[in-house]
Amino acid sequence: MAPAARTRRDAADETPTHAITHAMRIPFLRPSLPRTEELAPYLRRVDAAGIYSNYGPLARELETELLRRRFGGQGAVTTVANATLGLMLAISAVKRPGRRWAILPSFTFAAGPLAAMWCGLKPYFVDVTPGAWTLDEAALDAALAELGDDAAVVMPGATFGTAMDLSGYERRRAAGLPVVVDAAPAMGAGNDGMQFGRGFAGAVVYSLHATKPFGIGEGGLVYSADGELIARIRRDANFGFNAERMAETPGLNAKLSEYGAAVGLAMLESFAQRRAERRRVARGYAERFAASGLEQRGWEAQAPAADCPQFWPVLAPRGRSNRAVIAALAQDGIECRSYFAPACHQQPAFAAAGRGPLPVTEELAARAVSLPFWEAMTEEEMDAVLEALIRWG
Ligand SMILES: *Cc1c(COP(=O)(O)O)cnc(C)c1O
């Protein structure tokens, strides 16, 4: 395989679960970012302005346009260098002082609990629901009963771009429990044209990483209906500097460069088509899966609840390991992944974390297989994936 293709796959490799020793005919994903020609007008603007960072004109325009187009102008946003830093800044801004625990799902990407640890908190893992694979609010209540007054923040996650219902979290937040939503894969997700997260007065953190629906390479966006919270996070992302350039809060540098913002502005031009593409591929898989007979053999499809899915995961039959399925499909040159396996509580960095019962998480970590998924995936490629799944499944 050509070196360029290998590089693309490596760049997408967030959680390598096994060694892939030969070239894949159908990779797990092909990041699709604006091409040089689409970027050129924006790069010329960077040249002309001579400003390269520090919330320059392109970053400000990207913020304004995302707020207007995705959030209907309601609330406030600030760009960040990546979602992990966005999560750290948001947790640091809202956490209850002197409390120890960040409550979050184990069925998520490691960035969430890592960000909590960088804020001096200990992760406490709670199970997800079997239907939506998002934080189980009954299990959250049990965790809150267990931890008493020692919960600093709760961090639900919009798993694979699922537009989860935030009304329960809005109530909890208003009652004094700070909420940071890890919406990393959910830029573009929502219902009825309304961006997921809009109107929420806690912090909602989106990733603009190359492997996410709105990919610019590295980048992120923090949204809140609370403009003061965003102003605080924006200041903290610039060393905590006040108007006199005095560090006032424990800030850090999490600013998005003007080059990143240039990619974001170019991305905005094609984002509606890209979202439609993701829906087309999700529909294509759903139709093929329904017609495949796999359900009669114990396979289950996880219907994406959002209109801009990040991945297309299925569950292997009970007792069948996703690792074995992934290894089998790799023999056909088809690269699948096991998001999120291992789950966070199974990873060494979180050995000291607290946890409630995690039966759903452990079952998903053992059975979930994410199929290859990207915009512009052809019907023939989807056919090949399903044929291999039927053959090996
Ligand atoms: C991608 C992702 C992150 C990390 O985002 P970065 O921008 O790469 O830091 C965090 N949480 C979840 C759920 C993700 O999918």
Image: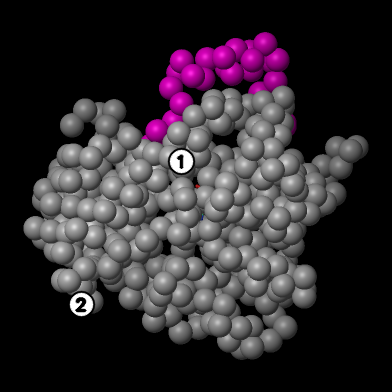
Q: Secondary structure at mark 1?
A: helix
Most foreground residue, 150 or 333: 333
Mark 2 Cα shell of 10 Å, populated few (<14), some (14-19), many (≥20): few
Residue drawn at (58%, 65%) of the image = 165
Which region is colored magenta? Answer: 31-55
Report the residue marked by disc 2. 319
Report if residue 200 is visible in the image. Answer: yes
| 330 relative position to 86: left or right | left
Q: Amino acid at mark 1?
A: Arg
Label 1, ligand 1: CB separation under 8 Å: no
Most foreground residue, 368 or 386: 386
Q: Return the x and y of residue 308 as percentages of the image width and height.
A: 46, 48
Q: Secondary structure at mark 2?
A: loop
Residue drawn at (34%, 71%) of the image = 364
| 332 relative position to 372: left or right | left
Where is the N terminus found, in terms of image quarters?
top left
Q: Return the x and y of residue 84 as percentages of the image width and height.
A: 57, 51
Residue drawn at (36%, 76%) of the image = 362
Magenta stretch: includes residue 151: no
* The image quarter in which residue 320 lies: bottom left
Mark 1 against mark 2, which lies toward the viewer?
1
Mark 1 Cα shell of 10 Å, populated few (<14), some (14-19), many (≥20): some
Residue ranking furthest to the right: 244
Q: Amino acid at mark 2?
A: Gly
Magenta stretch: includes residue 54: yes
N-terminal of the two: label 1 or label 2? 1
Report the residue marked by disc 1. 275
Most foreground residue, 56 or 194: 194
Q: Return the x and y of residue 250 as percentages of the image width and height.
A: 76, 53
Q: Return the x and y of residue 54 as percentages of the image width and height.
A: 72, 31
Q: Is residue 241 above or below residue 355?
A: above
Residue drawn at (37%, 52%) of the image = 311
